[in-house]
Image (cartoon, helix red, strand yellow):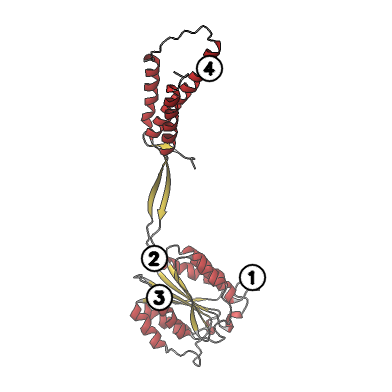
Amino acid sequence: MFDGLSFEFEFLFLLLFLFALCAFFCKERATSLYFPHTKEFLKNTVAASKLLFFLKWLGIVMMVFALMSPIKEEPYEITPKDGVEIALILDASESMKEGGFDAKNGHLTRFDAVQEIVGDFINKRKSDNMGLVVFGSYAFIASPLTYDADILNKILSQLSIGMAGKYTALNTSLAQGVNLLKMGKSKTKIAILLTDGHSTPEVDRVPLEIALEMVKKEGIKVYPIGIGMPHEYNREVLLKIANESGGVAFGASSAVQLQEVYKKIDELETSQIKGESFTLTHYYYQFPLFIALLSLMLYVYLKNKRGYA
């Protein structure tokens, strides 16, 4: 607890020299006592004098230490929580079972690779309020907006292919992303929409135009990402979403390219957040002050006790 202690008023240490000078030049006058049998008495008197000397100087030293004000300073930084609000919209349809997306780990599915890359993106966005939307045949909010990256990553790791159905409700997922971002209060709201397929009309009940109107009404910038080969996803639709929302559309045929896409989005949407630094000061003067008072009270008591005078 006392590691890194310092003193606010170090110069008051000089008071000890003042007390030492006073003790040397201002000696106390004591009455001489004469006894016929003094051997045992003198022995007790010397022991008592040593104890009194110790108590007096312990009190003086501790009192000076208390006046010097021992402190311990700890730096403390507060990061304001008013960054970008981000809806991470992830395709968990049946087609995300495809392997080979990550050349280094061929056994991983597309969704496995996406989970890992999105998890890294979450960890980099320290000041942002983020949430998760998962879609397949329907879309749902897997996580509301949160600043807690650990909780968000835990939820992300528990998502699985097919949990929202095997088809692709692309427009519905975009509308659900808008619903998620409505919960926030930030001036900057973005949605990162990732898919590897075309919208399935039979399950996608929200028309694209309606979804785009919702996006524009809330002032949300959308970054659509198509993964896999270019023919596997609807590039024209993704471009339309990006153009009408003020975002940028991307394509990624491998995990390496997808990492670069999220890196690019991270650069495009920087959070201009400045942390505030404080110094917490802990005061410990009460400890030497308590010892000083205790020792001086004991000194006065013993000094006035019969046999110690």
Q: Measure the alpha-carbon separation of dots 1 and 2.
A: 34 Å
Q: Measure the alpha-carbon separation of dots 1 and 3.
A: 34 Å
Looking at marks 4 and 1 on the same chain, the residue that comes earlier in the sequence is marked by 4
How far across and down, in percent of the image, does residue 80 sit? 38, 60
How far across and down, in percent of the image, does residue 24 sit? 40, 15
Whether residue 195 appears in this view of the structure is yes
- The amino acid sitting under disc 4 is Asn
Q: Which residue is mark 3?
A: 181
Q: Residue at x 54, y 83 (%)?
A: 164
Observer-nearest residue: 37 or 82?
A: 37
Q: Measure the alpha-carbon separation of dots 4 and 1.
A: 86 Å
Whether residue 236 appears in this view of the structure is no
Q: Which residue is mark 2?
A: 83
Considering the image in quadrants, where does the C terminus appear?
top left
> Closer to the observer: label 3 or label 4?
4
Q: Are marks 1 and 2 in contact (CB under 8 Å)?
A: no
Quadrant of residue 271 within the rendered picture: bottom left
Observer-nearest residue: 98 or 172?
A: 172
> Closer to the observer: label 1 or label 2?
2
Q: Measure the alpha-carbon separation of dots 4 and 2.
A: 75 Å
Q: Which residue is mark 4?
A: 44
- The amino acid sitting under disc 3 is Leu
Q: Which residue is mark 1?
A: 105
How far across and down, in percent of the image, does residue 155 sit? 53, 71
Q: Are marks 4 and 1 in contact (CB under 8 Å)?
A: no
